[in-house]
Amino acid sequence: MFIHNKRLQYTVRVAAPNPGLANLLLEQFGGPQGELGAACRYFTQAVGEDDPGRKDMLFDIATEELSHLEIVGSIVAMLNKGAKGQLAEAVESEAQLYRSMTGGGNDSHITSLLFGGGPALTNSAGVPWTAAYVDTIGEPTADLRSNIAAEARAKILYERLINVTDDPGIRETLGFLMTREIAHQKSFEKALHSIQPNFPQGKLPGVPEFTSVYYKMSQGDEAETRGPWNEGGDWVFVEDPQPAVDGGDGLATVNVNGADVKVLQAMAARTASDTSADPKTGADLGAGEAA
C-alpha cells in the first residue's frame, strides 16, 4: 500500500519561470536516467526479491525515487508557470508567445504545446518514456551492479543540470537529489558485497582456460597500453590471437541428415556463381556505357 504525503520530500523554491530549463529537467523526469525509470527498476526488483533485507531496501529506494519524481515534476511545473498561463489564455501576441517559448535557442515549445506546460513523461527532446529503460534481469548480483551504474549516471546528469542554472533554490534542490544518488549507490554496493561470492554473476563459473585471458584485438603502431586490466596476477596476455582460440579450425559446421545434404547440394548448384560471366548490367548502363 502506498500513502501519498502532500508535502514534498524537499522544499522546491523557484526564483522565476524558465521554460528552457524546464525542458532540460525533463531528462530526470521521463528520460533514460530519470527518476521514473529508477523507481520502476527498483520496484520490479523488490517484487521479485526473495531476500527480506534486499526486498525492504529496494522498496524503500523505489518509493524515494517516486518522491524525487514528484520534486522534479514540481520544479518543471513551476518553471513553466508563465508559459502555461500564456498558452492557455493567449495573453500575448503570436510572435511574443513564440519568442518567450523559444528564447535562448531552446526547444521547450514542443513540450509546452503538447503538454500545456506540465511535466511530461518524455526526455528533453520529447521522446516518450519507455519501459525499455528498465534493465532488470532478475539476478541480484547483476541487478545491483546495474543499479549502481544507473545511480552514477543520474548523479552526473544532476551535476550538469546544476551547472546550467544560477537559480539558487533550484541548485539547492538539485544538489539534494544528486546527493541522494550517492547514498543509493552506497546502499546498493553494500548490498552487493553482502552476497559472497558475487563475482562472476550467477551460478555457473567461467571456463577456466578463458577466464583470465586478455586478447589483444587491435592492431596499430602504438604500443599496447598495459595495466591491471590485462597484466599482473593471473592474467595471460595474448599478443596475436588467431582463430580459433579453442584449437579448432574456426569454421562453422552442422550435422544434417542425408536428405538435407542432397537438397543443400542442389541449392548450391542452382545458385553457384559463374566467375567467367561479365554481362552488361544496370550499373554499366547507369554509368553511361550504353551511349
Image (cartoon, rainbow, N blue to C red):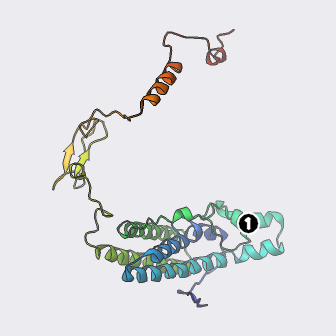
In the image, residue 119 lies at what x, y percent?
65, 73
Q: Is residue 86 above or below residue 130?
A: below
Residue 110, relative to residue 46: is it above or below? above
Mark 1 Cα-neighbour bin, 10 Å: few <14, some 14–19, many ≥20: few
User: In this rendering, would 210 be left or right of 53?
Assistant: left
At horizontal 63% and vertical 69% (from top left) the residue drawn is 121
Residue at screen point 35% across, 77% down: 186
The percent position of residue 262, horizontal first and vertical second, equals 46, 25
Quadrant in which the N terminus appears: bottom right
Q: The C terminus is located in which quarter? A: top right
Relative image position of residue 275 (x, y in whole percent): 48, 13
Asked where in the image residue 21 lies, by quadrant, the reply is bottom right
Q: Is residue 201 visible?
A: yes
Percent of width and height locating residue 266: 50, 22
Residue 225 appears anywhere in the view: no
Q: Nearer the viewer, residue 134 or 11?
A: 134
SS for callout 1: helix
**Residue, disc 1:** 114
Please report the residue visible at 62 percent of the width from the left and 60 percent of the height from the top: 125
In the visual, does 158 lie left or right of 72?
left
Left or right: residue 95 versus residue 129 is right
Q: How many marks?
A: 1
**Tag 1: residue type?**
Leu
